[in-house]
Image (cartoon, coloured by chain):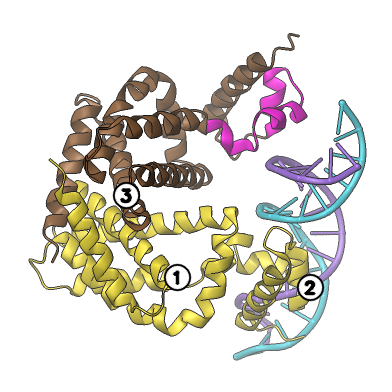
Chain colours: A brown, B yellow, C cyan, D purple
Amino acid sequence: MPRNGDEARRRLQQAALELFAEQGFDQTPVEAIAARAGVTERTFYRHFADKREMLFDGEGELRDQLVQALAAVPDGTKPMPALLAAFHQTVPLFESNRPFTEPGARLIARTPALQERSLAKQALLVRALTAALQDRGVNARTALLCAQAAMGTFAIATHRWMDDPSVTLHNHLDQAFRELRLATAALK
Amino acid sequence: MPRNGDEARRRLQQAALELFAEQGFDQTPVEAIAARAGVTERTFYRHFADKREMLFDGEGELRDQLVQALAAVPDGTKPMPALLAAFHQTVPLFESNRPFTEPGARLIARTPALQERSLAKQALLVRALTAALQDRGVNARTALLCAQAAMGTFAIATHRWMDDPSVTLHNHLDQAFRELRLATAALK
DNA sequence: GTCTATACTGAGATAGAC
DNA sequence: GTCTATCTCAGTATAGAC
């Protein structure tokens, strides 16, 4: 049995995805995942803080890439256009990982406990984007409001893309943000 | 020992709030809550699906009131203005319960597990508002996008109100939605 | 790597409420 | 006497402590 840490981590993820697909998330004990991966239960918790966490591995990378992209947007760009530009930058991350992320997304969609965690991850992204906007000189209140609105719109765009991949994620993004602008323009 | 269900439920909530305030949410076992309320642990779970659920009792009432308020908005009102109007209708619910909800809100703010649940409750509201908008003839995609953007803005307004009660919640609401309109107007 | 606290679940028995 | 809230008991799973 190899003792390579990353190897075990990947085996755990693979085993978990299979078992979750077969019998559902709640019906799959950590013990079963560890067994199929050929490690002990304790090892599982060395790699993942908890059972839900397995499904959100790419989140850190996405966050880093978003923050970096946002910092790279030309000075003077207003918050919402800057956020939209940053989201466009991360599209390749989604397109390249689609075959891997799609089964996970479907599982999340039908598992309440995972939806909760997904929303929590989204909230982390909002925090990171808020901070990144403040680094661009946006005041704290505006930064939070924009980051939240943009994040929600981004999430809608990616969901639509999962449902309808015949349209590119780029187009879904532009379309969703356009709808947001039109809808809010009716205010006041 | 009396067997009145509602009475026990209230005692459980009271006991929980006290204990959470004293020692924190994670450090308070359900057993301790049940003991202080004078019932067994199993009874706790008859009244609440899980430990987190205690803190979100008013959510159902808020949801019902929002849906009702949205249905009462004059026909022809566009989605975002209709949502804003509905939120204004629920302001009394917040103002009257403030002394009760504020300690809970502070606890939620400093307890990650409760923040997750709070976001999940918010997602339920988004669903309900989306459906209510569809009942008003708004198409499904627009309804979801508007409900989500409005809900997030509403949440920001209530948070600002918690931080700064010298301004009315009505004013915080108008201010936040105005900021949303101005920020998104910079798109495209 | 082992042990333990704690969250939650299920089934059947019991005892106030009406 | 029925009904249903509560209790007793026995158990599984997660996660954290040692």
State how far apart marks 1 and 3 are (Cα). Answer: 20 Å
**Where is mark 1, residue-wise?**
B163
Dot 2 and dot 1 residues touching (CB under 8 Å): no
State how far apart marks 2 and 1 are (Cα). Answer: 35 Å
In the image, the segment drawn in magenta is A30-55
Q: Residue at x 29, y 61 (%)?
A: B129
Task: Inspect the image, locate mark 1, and give the three-letter code of the amino acid beneath it.
Answer: Asp
Label 1 chain ID: B
Question: B6 and A167: which one is in front?
Answer: A167
**Apparent side of residue B65 relative to residue B36 in the rendered image (left or right):** left
Q: Residue at x 19, y 75 (%)?
A: B72
Element at badge 3? loop
Q: Is residue A14 above or below residue B7?
A: above
Label 2 chain ID: B
Element at badge 2? helix
In the rendered image, residues at marks 3 and 2 fall on the same chain: no
Q: Is residue A22 above or below residue B23?
A: above
**Where is mark 3, residue-wise?**
A138
Q: Is residue A154 above or below residue C11?
A: above
